[in-house]
Amino acid sequence: MVKFLAHIMAVLRMIRISNLLIVIVTQVLVRQCLIVPLLKQVHMEPQLPLGSFVVLIIATVLITAGGYAINDYFDRKIDRVNKPGAQIVGTLIYPRHAMAYHLVFTILGVILGTWVALKAGELYLSLVFFIVSGLLWFYSTSYKHELLLGNIMVALLTSLVPFIVLLFELPLLARNYGANINFILPVLMKWVLGFSLFAFLMNLIREIVKDAEDFEGDQAYGKKTIPVVWGMRAAKSISLVLIALTGALFAIAWVNYVPDFTSLIYFVTLIIMPLIVTAILLFRGNDTQTYHKASLWLKLIMLTGLGYMIIVNLLINNMK
């Protein structure tokens, strides 16, 4: 029993259970804090049944878990250098078992995603799961070794997590409400794509910072990351520019879309100030520990940024 529990804990670490929980929370917040209250403003309701939505979340989580498993499978040699005390596949989990977990998780995710698409009467939506699972495979086998391509691909796939909720709603809304959906569609797109853009930027920055943290192993095994190809200074400069861009976009969002005191306080204390702390860490530090701290700060900012959906929900409800 002890050995079995240890194996389960190792699997949970391999599939990044904390990140999977973030995926679940993100999709629940998008539906309950953005889509539902915005539709209520025009006397509409979400058309994807709750049961199908739950299965959609499970499908997303399974495919993401499969992506983590295959990534660790192909990163075994590099992880021996970058994570000597934290490597999972090859130490706690046999490589062939990691591959098996990848196949099981991915196949189940695609099947469940296809089921949701069938239940929604929009089978073409199942292509999303086939494409994403394929991209995760090619990312792990080749794309992640290419300059910038791997970073951008991970950021794009992460930005799809909030958007996929709206993607499955839109055709059903159009089918049930017809042209009336045109009144609320721009607002729905603005909010959901706004959070998708935030997820893209934060993950792109974090991927570059993690590459700086993993410089030694990446260089030893010929990965073409920004720190390896262009140097650490370039990686830090690009990260700082993207951090500044993210802060500027929040300022623009406050001025043009949510110029209320609550949003201002939230942005300044939970987004802008942590971004400044992260920028200072990157500017002053030049060691693995500093890059690790910066990565953790970026993950925290990601969480607080997604948490703003709760504030949006309150603001929408107060508009009634």
Image (tube, helix red, strand yellow):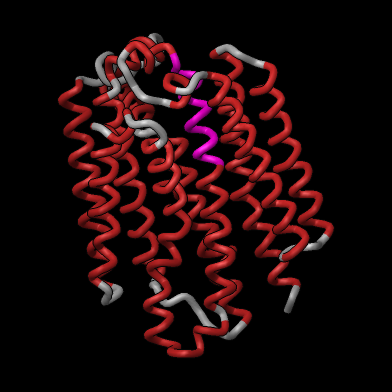
The answer to which of 233 and 316 lies nearer the viewer is 233
Where, by quadrant of the figure, is residue 112 drawn?
A: bottom left
Residue 282, given in percent of the width and then of the height, sits at 64, 23
Where, by quadrant of the figure, is residue 287 drawn?
A: top right
User: At 56% across and 55% down in the image, what residue appears?
Assistant: 195
Classify residue 142 as left or right of residue 212. left
> From this viewpoint, which residue is outermost toward the right?
261
Where, by quadrant of the figure, is residue 14 drawn?
A: top left
The answer to which of 197 and 222 lies nearer the viewer is 222
The answer to which of 232 and 273 lies nearer the viewer is 232
Residue 177, given in percent of the width and then of the height, sits at 45, 88
Q: Is residue 190 magenta?
A: no
Q: Name the chief secondary structure element in magenta.
A: helix
Vertical placement of 267 versus 95: above or below? below
Residue 56, given in percent of the width and then of the height, sits at 35, 59
User: At 69% across and 70% down in the image, what residue appears?
Assistant: 316
Residue 111, given in percent of the width and then of the height, sits at 20, 56
Pick the quarter of the image with the N terminus.
Answer: top left
Q: Which residues are magenta?
A: 202-215
Q: Is residue 212 magenta?
A: yes
Vertical placement of 259 versus 120: above or below? above
User: At 70% across and 43% down in the image, what residue appears?
Assistant: 271
Vertical placement of 85 versus 17: above or below? above
Pick the quarter of the image with the C terminus.
Answer: bottom right
